[in-house]
């Protein structure tokens, strides 16, 4: 998996933004789509900038789920993590994961409500 991530980075380097970087492999290494958030104790250098939060997402082997995950869930997570400093601060301060989950659910509900209103 590490070799796959490094190969992907050699083709398309992940960019740091607000102390966060998203990484994804070329090939899937999990059965189902998944997303993991790693919060480092100390920032590391990533493309000449510092990052402390690494978000790894894998599309999984189930094609339909991968498409749905990529088109819906990942966009919400990117929106939440990159657009709201409160989430980044919660992650960096190792706050209660329930707070982050509640915040995510609130934003997700708002996004879904807005999407329904456009139908």
Image (cartoon, rainbow, N blue to C red):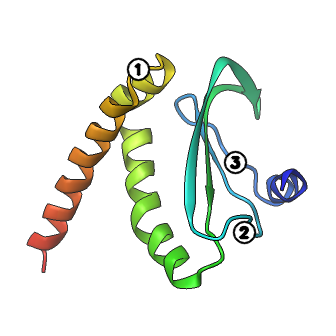
Binning the other alpha carbons within 10 Å of mark 2 as few (below 14), some (14 to 19) or many (20 upward) gives some
Please name the residue that numbered disc 3 is placed on: 14
Q: Is residue 38 above or below residue 112?
A: above
Which of these two is toward me, 87 or 64?
Answer: 64
Q: Residues within 10 Å of mark 1 (few under 14, many from 20)?
A: few
Residue 56 at x, y percent in the picture: 63, 49
- In whole angstroms, how far apart are the C-alphas of marks 1 and 2? 30 Å
Q: Is residue 55 left or right of residue 114?
A: right
Residue tagged 2: 28
Q: Callout 1: helix, strand or loop?
A: loop
Foreground disc of the pair 3, 1: 1
Q: Quadrant of the N terminus?
A: bottom right
Q: Earlier in the sequence, mark 1 or mark 2?
A: 2
Note whether 76 is above or below 97 in the view shown: below
The image shows residue 94 at horizontal and vertical percentages of 48, 20
- The numbered disc on residue 95 is 1
> Which residue is drawn at the image coordinates 38% and 49% (left, top)?
79
Q: Position of residue 98 (x, y in %)?
A: 33, 33
User: Do the CB atoms of the residues marked 1 and 2 lie less than 8 Å apart?
Assistant: no
């Amino acid at each position: 998996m590490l070799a796959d991530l490094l190969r992907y980075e050699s083709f398309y380097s992940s960019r740091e933004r607000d102390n966060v970087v998203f990484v994804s492999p070329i090939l899937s290494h999990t059965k189902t789509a998944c997303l993991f958030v790693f919060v480092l104790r100390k920032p590391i250098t990533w493309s000449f900038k510092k990052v402390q939060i690494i978000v790894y997402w894998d599309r999984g082997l189930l094609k339909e789920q991968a498409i749905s995950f990529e088109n819906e869930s990942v966009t919400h997570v990117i929106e939440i993590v990159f657009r709201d400093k409160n989430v980044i601060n919660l992650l960096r301060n190792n706050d209660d994961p329930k707070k982050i989950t509640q915040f995510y659910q609130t934003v997700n509900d708002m996004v879904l409500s807005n999407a329904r209103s456009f139908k």
